[in-house]
Image: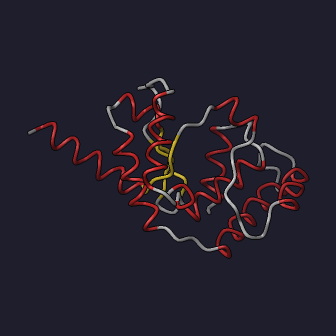
Amino acid sequence: MTADILLTHFERYPRMEAQDAVKLIYQNEFGPGHLIRDEAKSLKMLEEEMANLSADAKEALYEPIGNGLCRLNLRACLSRGITAADVSRLLSETAKGVTGDKKRFWLGVRVLQELADADETPFEPVLLDLFLARYPKTCPPMHHSEMYSRIYQPAYRVISQKRVKDYMALRRAKEQE
């Protein structure tokens, strides 16, 4: 995890909390694998989530999170006619290619701690310390904080940025036929 990715997200999401920053590092390192234990169930959850969203053409299709991954915005997918089945396929393909490493995750957390110590995070360093004191060393996935969820209403899936770009290029090519 690079400091630049964290700083970009702090700027874009100034109400981000320590939990959200650690979640970003988790996603950067481990990708979406925890969501794909059962592909049929994952697709059904995705279909239900997308059915309850409104399309938004103003939102970017994706935002980079480093390590070749991005957060694919589901509202933007709806506005572009990208189906839950397409997102699910991209998600599954991504999950198969990302394994992650706990040591690299904790190195990313160290970068976050250095930014917090330098007063470059939207939260106090002590809040990060408190969160990390409770966070298990096994690095489990987590949800966004209540604050982040309420303010930003995140609706995305972590996908390989290259897969998204290739998918969009293929769609454009088919549209031109």
Locate residue 78 relative to residue 120 in the image: left or right.
left
Q: Relative to residue 75, is residue 31 depicted above or below?
A: below
Q: Residue 163 location, x and y as percent?
A: 35, 55
Locate residue 122 relative to residue 167 in the image: left or right.
right
Count of labels shown?
Answer: 0
Q: Residue 20 location, x and y as percent?
A: 71, 47
The residue under the point 57% across, 64% down is: 30
The residue under the point 88% across, 62% down is: 133
Q: Residue 94 location, x and y as percent?
A: 43, 60
Q: Quadrant of the C terminus?
A: top left
Q: Residue 62 location, x and y as percent?
A: 46, 43
The residue under the point 67% across, 57% down is: 141
Q: Relative to residue 142, is residue 84 depicted above or below?
A: above
The residue under the point 77% across, 44% down is: 17
Q: Quadrant of the N terminus?
A: bottom right
Q: Relative to residue 60, is residue 5 depicted above or below?
A: below
Quarter occupied by residue 60: top left
